[in-house]
């Protein structure tokens, strides 16, 4: 049995981990305003702090036995909000192609929406796996680098496609390679979560012959 399954989940709202999550959530619009106003260093700093404190709320909740239902929902929602607004910001300033934001937003909508539906409608919670955390970490590092937009490295020159930065010949921020690695892991973990959800739903279904006399 995993550590998450052994932890008692409370209905408390005002806990230290939840306060940290709310603070992280408030940092999301601050980052976007700074970036859109050309404050790359300040925007990168705010984004980095919001991203690197991701582990704090979960660790404090488990160590102080204050894991809450709100925290279980709020933590991934804040992560996804930071991720979506992060990629939206670098897209708006022209540092990442449109398909990246579409893929990330679609994936996050599926994971967060599906997870919320399973939790509140079916009382099923799919535990977060470490590859998913690694994917989020890679993406956060990549976006922080793209926000700062320094240093730039030469492209590989493998194609002339403008929507594949890093693979074409244009100079690009090194963070794009962390973005690609994070996207690959994200796709893999999404497949895992979908299969785990289907398996959990199947176990909740009553046996076909259970109502027979």
Image (spheres, grey):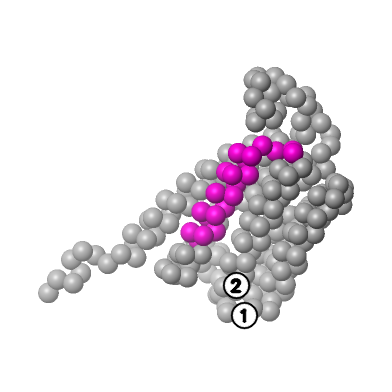
Quadrant in the rendering for residue 152: top right
Distance (Cα) linking label 2 and label 1:
8 Å
Quadrant in the rendering for residue 56: bottom right
Where residue 70 sits in the image (x, y, percent)? 60, 72
Please say if 212 is above or below 12. above
Q: Which residue is mark 2?
A: 70
Q: Which residue is mark 1?
A: 12
- The residue lying at 76 percent from left, 30 percent from top is 172
The reply to whether residue 140 is in sight is: no
Classify 10 Å Cα crowding around label 2: few (below 14), some (14-19), many (20 and above): some
Label whose residue precedes the other's in the sequence (2 or 1): 1
- The residue lying at 48 percent from left, 59 percent from top is 114
- The residue lying at 55 percent from left, 49 percent from top is 106
Where residue 145 sits in the image (x, y, percent)? 78, 42
Rendered-image quadrant of the C terminus: bottom left
The circle on residue 162 is none
Quadrant in the rendering for residue 96: top right
- The residues colored magenta run 94-115
Asked if residue 47 lies left or right of residue 7, the reply is: right
Which one is nearer the viewer's eye here, 52 or 62? 52
Where residue 68 sits in the image (x, y, percent)? 60, 74
Please say if 213 is above or below 200. below
């Amino acid at each position: 049995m995993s550590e998450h399954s052994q932890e008692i989940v409370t209905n408390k709202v005002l806990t230290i981990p939840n306060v940290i999550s709310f603070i992280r959530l408030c940092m999301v619009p601050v980052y976007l305003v700074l970036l859109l106003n050309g404050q790359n260093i300040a925007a990168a700093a705010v984004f980095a702090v919001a991203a690197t404190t991701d582990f704090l709320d979960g660790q404090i909740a488990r160590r102080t036995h204050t894991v809450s239902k709100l925290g279980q929902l709020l933590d991934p929602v804040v992560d996804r909000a930071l991720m979506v607004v992060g990629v939206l910001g670098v897209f708006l300033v022209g540092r990442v192609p449109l398909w990246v934001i579409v893929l990330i937003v679609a994936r996050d909508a599926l994971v967060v929406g599906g997870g919320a539906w399973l939790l509140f409608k079916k009382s099923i919670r799919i535990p977060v796996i470490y590859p998913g955390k690694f994917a989020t970490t890679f993406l956060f590092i990549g976006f922080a680098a793209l926000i700062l937009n320094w240093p730039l490295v030469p492209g590989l020159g493998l194609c002339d496609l403008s929507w594949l930065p890093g693979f074409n010949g244009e100079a690009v921020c090194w963070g794009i390679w962390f973005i690609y690695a994070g996207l690959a892991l994200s796709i893999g973990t999404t497949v895992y979560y979908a299969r785990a959800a289907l398996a959990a739903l199947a176990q909740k279904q009553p046996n076909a012959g259970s109502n027979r006399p």
